[in-house]
C-alpha cells in the first residue's frame, strides 16, 4: 500500500491553527520545568507545515463536496476489502495503517479523495461519460488470474535458474498440477515471483485491453476459461503456468471509478500541469483563500504549475 500523506493536523492543535493565533494557552503537558502549551506546539511545527496541512484539508473538503455524488461507497468498500486481502487479513492491514498514523475510516476517506481527484482531472480534460463507457466496453470482461513462475537467469535477474534448470522445474510443477495438486499451494512452494507467491500466485483482476503483461502471457491468459490451467508459457522472465481463477463480465457501475482513475492517471502522465490547473479552477469556484501570507503562498504553489526548466544549449 502506498503511504498516504497525512492531511489532518494532530488533534491537539486547536481549530484556528491556520491563523497562527487565537489558540488557547491550555497546557498539554505539565512539568516542573514549565508546561507545554498549544501555542508552543504551533510555533515548533512552524507556519510552512501548518499551511501545508491547512491547504491539504481544504483540498480534501472541496473535492469531497464537489464530487460527492460521483463517489460510490460500494467501490470504496471493494477497494478497502481488496487491500485488506492483499495484506493477508484485517490484523496485518490494521497494523500497517497504525504504523502510518491512519485508521480504517481515514483510509476510506483517502480512497474517496483519490476518486474525486480523478473526476476533477477528467473534467479539466473534457472527458465525459461516453469515454468512460467506451473504455468499459473494451475491458468489461475481467479475468482473475494467478501464475507460477520459475525465473530464468538474465542480465536483470541474476538469481534465476539456467534455462534448462527452469524448464525442468516448471515441468515438475506441471506434473504435480496434472496429478491433482493445489495451484495456490504449489505457487507458494515453487514460484519465484515473490510479489505474489505467498498469495498463491494471485495477480488480481485485469482485462486483455488494459493488461500490463507481456504479449506471450496475454495470448494464453485471456483465452482461458474459469478454473482452466494453461500449459507451460515461455516469456522473457522465465517459464509460467497460468490459472484463470475466475472470468466474469462486470457492470459499468462496478468498473466506473476504476476506469475514471485509470484515464486520469494516463492524462496526468501526458500533461503534468493538468492537476494544478484543475485545482486552481476548483479553488476559485469554492472561493478558497488564505488568512495569512504563509497559507496564501501555499495555495499559490499548489495551483500554479512549475514552469519547465529550459534546456541548456550545448552549442555555445
Image (spheres, rainbow, N blue to C red):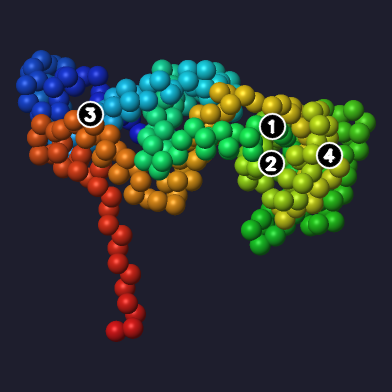
Residue bearing the label numbered 3 = 286
Q: Residues within 10 Å of mark 3 (few under 14, many from 20)?
A: some
Q: Is residue 264 above or below residue 16?
A: below
Q: Which residue is mark 1?
A: 141
Q: Between 58 and 156, which is closer to the camera in this rendering?
A: 58
Disc 2 to disc 3, C-alpha distance = 41 Å
- Look at the numbered discs 3 and 1 and tell me whether their residues touch, using CB distance below 8 Å: no
Could you say where residue 270 lies in the image, as x and y percent from the top left?
44, 52
Q: Which residue is pictured at 16% across the width and 19% down the height? A: 14
Q: Residue at x 21, y 35 (%)?
A: 284
Q: Which mark is residue 230?
A: 4
Residue at the (79%, 51%) spot, across then down: 234
Answer yes or no: do the residues labelled 1 and 2 have beta carbons within 8 Å? yes
**Whole-percent x, y for residue 136 in the image:** 60, 34
Q: Residue furthest right?
A: 179
Which of label 2 and label 3 is nearer to you?
3
Q: Are marks 4 and 2 in contact (CB under 8 Å)?
A: no
Tag 1, which secondary structure?
strand
Taking the spot 30% from the left edge, 44% from the top edge, the residue there is: 277
Looking at the picture, how far across and down is residue 255, in whole percent? 57, 28
Earlier-in-chain disc, 2 versus 3: 2
Judge depth for marks 4 and 2 and give the one in front. 2
Q: Kindly report the distance in space between the C-alpha atoms of the residues bearing marks 4 and 2.
A: 16 Å
Q: Earlier in the sequence, mark 4 or mark 3?
A: 4
Identify the element where label 4 is drawn. Answer: loop
Mark toward the viewer: 1 or 4: 1
Q: Which residue is mark 2?
A: 208
Whole-number angstrom distance, CA of label 3 to CA of label 1: 39 Å
Amino acid at each position: 500500500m502506498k503511504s498516504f500523506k497525512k492531511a489532518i493536523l494532530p488533534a491537539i492543535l486547536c481549530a484556528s491553527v491556520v491563523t497562527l493565533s487565537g489558540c488557547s494557552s491550555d497546557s498539554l503537558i505539565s512539568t516542573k520545568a514549565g508546561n507545554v502549551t498549544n501555542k508552543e506546539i504551533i510555533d515548533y511545527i512552524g507556519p510552512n507545515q501548518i499551511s501545508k496541512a491547512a491547504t491539504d484539508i481544504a483540498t480534501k473538503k472541496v473535492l469531497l463536496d464537489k464530487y460527492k455524488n460521483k463517489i460510490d461507497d460500494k467501490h470504496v468498500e471493494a477497494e478497502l476489502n481488496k487491500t485488506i486481502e492483499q495484506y493477508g487479513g484485517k490484523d496485518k492491514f490494521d497494523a500497517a495503517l497504525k504504523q502510518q498514523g491512519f485508521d480504517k475510516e481515514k483510509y476510506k476517506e483517502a480512497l474517496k479523495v483519490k476518486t474525486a481527484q480523478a473526476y476533477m482531472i477528467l473534467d479539466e480534460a473534457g472527458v465525459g461519460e461516453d469515454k468512460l463507457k467506451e473504455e468499459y466496453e473494451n475491458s468489461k470482461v475481467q479475468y482473475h488470474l494467478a501464475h507460477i513462475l520459475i525465473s530464468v537467469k538474465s542480465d536483470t535477474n541474476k538469481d534465476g535458474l539456467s534455462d534448462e534448470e527452469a524448464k525442468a522445474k516448471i515441468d515438475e510443477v506441471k506434473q504435480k498440477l496434472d496429478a491433482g495438486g493445489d495451484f495456490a499451494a504449489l505457487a507458494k512452494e515453487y514460484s519465484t515471483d515473490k510479489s505474489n507467491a505467498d498469495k498463491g500466485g494471485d495477480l488480481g483482476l485485469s482485462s486483455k485491453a488494459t493488461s500490463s503483461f507481456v504479449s506471450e502471457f496475454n495470448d494464453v491468459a485471456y483465452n482461458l476459461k474459469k478454473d482452466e490451467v494453461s500449459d507451460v508459457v515461455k516469456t522473457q522472465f522465465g517459464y509460467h503456468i497460468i490459472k484463470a481463477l475466475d472470468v466474469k463480465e462486470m457492470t459499468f457501475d462496478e468498473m466506473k471509478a476504476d476506469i475514471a482513475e485509470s484515464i486520469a492517471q494516463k492524462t496526468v502522465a501526458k500533461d503534468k500541469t493538468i492537476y494544478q490547473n484543475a485545482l486552481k479552477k476548483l479553488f476559485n469556484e469554492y472561493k478558497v483563500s488564505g488568512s495569512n501570507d504563509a497559507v496564501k503562498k501555499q495555495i499559490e504553489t499548489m495551483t500554479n504549475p512549475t514552469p519547465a526548466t529550459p534546456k541548456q544549449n550545448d552549442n555555445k
